[in-house]
Image: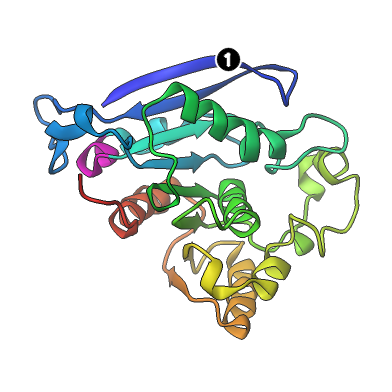
Amino acid sequence: MIRMRTDFFAESLGMGTSMVVLMPQAAAGIGMEGADGAASVAEDERGVPVLYLLHGLSDDCTIWERRTSIERYATEKGIAVVMPEVRRSFYADEVVGEKYWTFIAEELPQLIASTFRVSTAREDTFVAGLSMGGFGAFKLALNHPDRFAAAASLSGVLDARTLDLGWTGTLGERVWAGRDVAGTADDLVGLVGAADPAALPALFVDCGTEDELLAHHRTFLAAADERGVEVQARLRPGAHTWDFWDQSIQDVLDWLPVRER
């Protein structure tokens, strides 16, 4: 893997920000097992498949590398991984703050497509995240289903309508100004309940039965089931921890429909 910590100016944010990008390369290195067909990476005119991997509320663009072996897992799959920085934004255009939804949904994919050798085809584009990042992953998938082949939420905030933000200080006022998110682009339950099942990407959720966000998953899955939206759901023993997510992201990579090169 080629690993890059990239600092750049984001027009939508009006400031500099960062991301970590992992790009496949033909040589895996000693002790690393490369993906089948890795030797063809340089000749892949279409560009390599890409996973946008989103961080949680307390994290940054480096957290997936520091808490899991995502570089090693992605190497085995021959997939690029883009890990952007969004601070404590809930992947929203903040009422008092910056336009992180515009950044993540519009500016970032354009920047990635113009800078790195990744495919822009829907069938090669995936998104996943944990906690707040799980919310961001499904927000992207449900608002822009034409862009993604698959989306995964790991212990995600799937029902922002009932989210208790009292412990986060001014986050609720800064991001949403206290407004009800029901019926907006942040209402994942409402979005899945009104979606065209045939138009959606493949959806995967994983949550621990001891996780405080378990009720969010039950509400979201009930709305999806009522609408006829198929979701591969796994509610298994575990809590809101990196031990859980380290295993989960490996399973997500196994589940993603990554094309053979």
Could you tell whether 160 is left or right of 134 in the image?
right
Magenta stretch, residue numbers: 72-78
Q: Of 127 and 135, which appears nearest the observer?
A: 127
Q: Is residue 21 above or below residue 152?
A: above
Q: Residue at x 51, y 56 (%)?
A: 153
* Residue 228 falls left or right of residue 98: left
Residue 148: x %, y % from top left: 49, 53
Tell me: 261 left or right of 162: left
Foreground of the two, 240 or 110: 110
Determine the residue positioned at 31% across, 51% down: 250
Q: Splitting the image into 4 quarters, where does residue 257 fall?
A: bottom left
Q: Is residue 213 above or below residue 220?
A: above
**Most common secondary structure along the magenta stretch:** helix
Q: Position of residue 202 (x, y in %)?
A: 45, 64
Residue 137 location (% of width, % of height): 56, 50
Mark 1: few, some, or many residues within 10 Å (few <14, many ≥20)? few
Q: Is residue 197 magenta?
A: no
Residue bearing the label numbered 1: 8
Helix, strand, or loop for circle 1? Answer: strand
Q: Quadrant of the C terminus?
A: top left
Hey, what amino acid is under mark 1?
Phe
Above or below, 221 relative to 67: below
